[in-house]
């Protein structure tokens, strides 16, 4: 598909690239940073920052090429791309992806490659050693994120099967969410969990971070249209409506159960609505977006509050409970609300499409879950993943970085 | 001399300070404290996880007084710190063996 460069489209995707990087730095970093205890705030900020740096280098070295360049052998190309654009070789200034420069496309996609591993941090926060974390994330980026991106967006088997994932429900949220669940099971619960109170040390930071995530998500979803057009406008609308719907419903549920609506609740609801609408955002109408947001709030509320407690795993900041569950839910609901009969854009049979979506989620979850376990094992053997008891008690900030987040004396 | 430790609600500290000044107390130490007595803590809920917060914020006021002042001081604190509700706090009185003003070396009542 060769067209001429469109400056409007290019300007919007450049802007979106900034918005999506802003979701990680500092949006997600602050959102997660506020949720941990005072002694671990820097460790979370550092994890986000270091992932952004290392993944960038890996992405330009081989990640982008393996995700988005076709492999010569078609059966290899079903699972992973080729190395023709390693180190962005063969990506001259004039190269286009659709109507935007390929460099812009590669950097836009990079910001997704950055936020996906960063999301996993929430699951093992407050107890994983820094070096092992970074080794695990580097490997995970190449072994899980890059191939799954190729399956879905780079011409791989999920794309050819007709799976729908507009902006990363499967590629981003299912991969990261399931990895979160596996990592938190691997490292084990925090010392004292769940008897010891571990309340967020600064919900103020979390609200600031959640606000940045919401705004940045316009780039994430509407930027994925790769054009400044009606599709981008509708995607942005669906994104906003779903976030608002989920935030409202979450508050209502809390009011029903606890008698008051909480700050942590409304921001968690908004993020759940954003994560869940992501795969559907470019395919649904306003009604579909409202419904998806409402269902997201109900299901994620259950998974982050009741399910986690009942099953006893320590997903510290609910990376699985909100992003994983929201991603799976949204990917399945995409098969429903993308249908033109429900105000969507796709001529699909809902029954068949839901089947395809389920298969795509299951395959992605299995790959991410299995590989996450293997890579954690490798990081564990090489460097040791779990902070020892003393480090955990004193906090990762002082023991892993020899710094403290606040000096209020 | 007596050493008086009063644990009071943080929002009563200014009133207690004024009441003590009015009965001739010229110095005191105030510390942010946490604790519980008959008034238990409170509950906080984060994503469905209920945390029982046992320790309630309090202020600890310490003053050293002459024996003769003690009754007035106790009454001043009690009146100014009382709201009539549970959690108003407690006053402890200890014997005070010696006092010294560091700058001059004065001791005893002269140093108060």
Image (tube, rainbow, N blue to C red):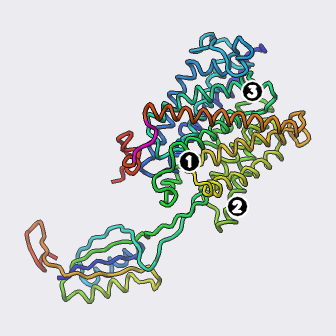
**Vertical order, A68 against B13 (above or below):** above
Return the chain for callout 2. A
Q: Which residue is mark 3?
A: A227
Return the chain for callout 3. A
Answer few, some or many: residues within 10 Å of disc 3's Cα (few below 14, many 20 plus, some between 14 and 19).
Answer: many
What residue is rendered at 51% in x and 67% in y? B52
* Mark 2 on the same chain as mark 3: yes
The majority secondary structure of the magenta stretch comes to loop
Q: Earlier in the sequence, mark 1 or mark 3?
A: 1
Q: Which residue is mark 1?
A: A208
Q: Earlier in the sequence, mark 1 or mark 2?
A: 1
Q: Which residue is mark 2?
A: A253
What residue is rendered at 24% in x and 82% in y? B24
Return the chain for callout 1. A
Q: Which residues are magenta?
A: A384-388
For label 3, the SS is loop
Across and down, in percent, residue A232 comes to: 76, 33
């Amino acid at each position: 598909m060769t067209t001429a460069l469109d400056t409007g489209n290019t300007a919007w995707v450049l802007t979106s690239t900034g918005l999506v990087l802003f979701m990680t730095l500092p949006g997600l970093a602050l959102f997660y940073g506020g949720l941990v205890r005072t002694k671990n705030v820097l460790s979370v900020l550092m994890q986000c920052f270091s992932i952004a740096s290392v993944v960038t280098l890996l992405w330009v070295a081989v990640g982008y090429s393996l995700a988005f360049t076709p492999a010569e052998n078609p059966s290899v190309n079903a699972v992973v791309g080729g190395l023709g654009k390693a180190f962005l070789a063969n990506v001259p200034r004039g190269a286009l992806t659709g109507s935007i420069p390929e460099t812009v496309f590669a950097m836009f996609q990079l910001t997704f490659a950055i936020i996906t591993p960063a999301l996993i941090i929430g699951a093992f926060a407050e107890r994983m050693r820094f070096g092992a974390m970074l080794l695990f994330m580097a490997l995970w980026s190449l072994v899980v994120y890059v191939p799954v991106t190729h399956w879905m967006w780079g011409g791989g088997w999920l794309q050819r099967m007709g799976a729908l994932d507009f902006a990363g429900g499967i590629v981003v949220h299912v991969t990261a969410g399931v990895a979160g669940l596996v990592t938190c099971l691997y490292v084990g619960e925090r010392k004292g969990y769940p008897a010891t109170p571990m309340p967020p040390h600064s919900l103020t930071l979390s609200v600031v971070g959640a606000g940045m995530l919401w705004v940045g998500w316009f780039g994430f979803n509407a930027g994925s249209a790769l054009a400044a057009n009606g599709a981008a406008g509708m995607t942005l609308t669906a994104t906003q409506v779903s976030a608002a719907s989920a935030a409202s419903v979450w508050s209502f549920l809390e009011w029903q159960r606890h008698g008051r609506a909480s700050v942590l609740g409304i921001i968690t609801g908004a993020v759940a609505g954003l994560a869940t609408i992501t795969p559907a955002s470019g395919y649904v109408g306003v009604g579909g977006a409202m419904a998806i947001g409402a269902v997201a709030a109900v299901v994620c509320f259950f998974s982050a509050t009741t399910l986690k407690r009942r099953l006893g795993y320590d997903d510290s900041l609910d990376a699985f409970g909100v992003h994983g569950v929201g991603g799976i839910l949204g990917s399945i609901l995409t098969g429903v609300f993308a249908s033109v009969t429900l105000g969507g854009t796709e001529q699909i049979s809902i029954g068949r499409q839901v089947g395809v979506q389920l298969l795509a989620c299951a395959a992605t979850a299995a790959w991410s879950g299995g590989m996450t376990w293997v890579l954690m094992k490798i990081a564990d053997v090489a460097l040791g993943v779990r902070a020892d008891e003393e480090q955990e008690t004193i906090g990762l900030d002082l023991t892993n970085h020899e710094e403290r987040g606040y000096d209020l004396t | 001399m007596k050493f008086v430790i009063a644990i009071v609600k943080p929002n009563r500290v200014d009133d207690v300070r004024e009441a003590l000044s009015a009965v001739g107390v010229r110095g005191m130490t105030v510390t942010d404290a946490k604790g519980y007595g008959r008034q238990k803590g409170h509950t906080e809920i984060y994503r469905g996880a209920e945390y029982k917060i046992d320790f309630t914020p309090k202020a600890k006021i310490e003053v050293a007084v002459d024996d003769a002042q003690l009754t007035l001081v106790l009454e001043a604190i009690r009146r100014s710190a009382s709201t009539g509700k549970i959690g108003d706090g407690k006053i402890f009185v200890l014997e005070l063996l010696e006092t010294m003003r560091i700058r001059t070396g004065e001791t005893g009542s002269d140093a108060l």
